[in-house]
Amino acid sequence: MRLAVLKERRGGETRVAATPETAKKLAALGCKVAIEMGAGMASGYPDALYADAGAEIAPDAAAALFGAGIVLKVRAPLVAGEGEIDELALMHRGALLVGTLEAVANPDRAAALAAAGIDACSMELAPRTTRAQSMDILSSQANLAGYRAVIEGAGAFDKAFPMLMTAAGTIPAANAFIMGAGVAGLQAIATARRLGARVSATDVRPAAKEEIKSLGAAFVGYEDEESKQAQTAGGYAKQLSAEFYAKQAEVVAAHIAKQDIVVCTALVQGRRAPTLVTEAMVASMKPGSVIVDIAADSGGNCAATRPGEMYVTENGVKILGYTNWPGRIANAASALYARNLLTFLTTFWDKETTAPKLPPEDDIVQGVTLTRGGAVVHPQLAAK
């Protein structure tokens, strides 16, 4: 079975879907691994390391994909009009594509994959179950995004994070406020604590309060009967009423005015990120304060965020609205992402045929499969 790994061509993407470590393990399964030349360079994996792992270095995408029954990607393949080449047109009908395909937000993408005869698995749709945990790309990438957000926030902050007692006087610890206590938020709390900040956090989900406290941060938030039902079965935050958000905003507004660093991480699955930091809240912050919005890919939690940019407001607040936060720590993010994909393939690997066998009735397979046999089969998309 030939397995192809392509260079990512979507703007700002620095990760790669296989590392030399996973390429070697894929070869051990019986795959003939083909890596497009330069695929790993942006994440610190030169071609020579893949060659040492036993992979073929293909000169271009067409050569890598020739005869490939499996294709690993970070982002969805380009189609005509999206970039320099039509990656989808180069793939063979019946090939298995595994990646972060974002078809729920881009419904035409699933139809294009089905028309091309590609059996596509979109790993961000994996169920939040114990069995699927080791292939959960959202968790692995969010963990690193939360870490990187605090590191970059600290770099943009022109004071120190920890309290520093010197002969010239004492510098107080920074006040860091983490908005959202999912995987990214909890890692942000832990990182800010390690750097010596005084940390507080908020989240509408009822289970988050104890998780926040367990990491040594103070909980900030409004609680009522509605907030007790603010979490889906999959662990995501639910969209709540405008009345709840208004009351939550009152509590948060008073707190934000005293903060040095605000890290925004709140996402609602399949929807635009909720606006948690208003323009008025930004205006109330001290000059030199920093807002890090890692929800910028979904529009941002801060009303003043400019996705893809870092800028300074009129009152001197720095807002970091970079997109693709995992890609800002590409080597580590690629390592974890590649292991997630490797785990998915090995879980369903048939040793006799040296090929993946994806039983449609399996809960993980049902969760991630977008298209099969030329049809869109995912329940969120099949009816559209």
Image: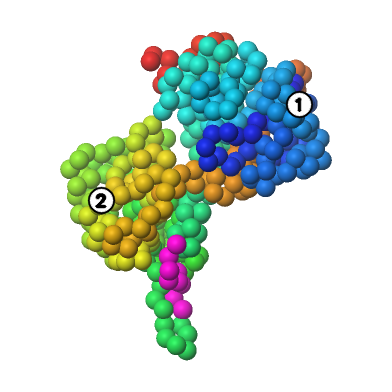
User: Which quarter of the rendering shows the N terminus?
Assistant: top right
Residue 159 falls within the magenta-colored stretch: yes
Is 122 rendered above or below residue 52? above
Residue identified by numbered label 1: 31
In the image, what residue occupies the spot 77% across and 43% down? 49
Q: Are marks 2 and 1 in contact (CB under 8 Å)?
A: no
| The one of 183 and 307 positioned closer to us in this rendering | 307
Predominant secondary structure, magenta span: loop
Within 10 Å of disc 2 (Cα), the crowding (few <14, some 14-19, many 20+) is some
Q: Which segment did they paint magenta?
A: 156-164
In the image, what residue occupies the spot 46% across and 83% down? 165
**Residue furthest bottom in the image:** 167
| The one of 15 and 332 positioned closer to us in this rendering | 15
> Residue type at mark 1?
Cys
Secondary structure beneath label 2: loop
User: In this rendering, does residue 307 appear at all?
Assistant: yes
Residue 354 in percent (x, y) is at 75, 21
Residue identified by numbered label 2: 278
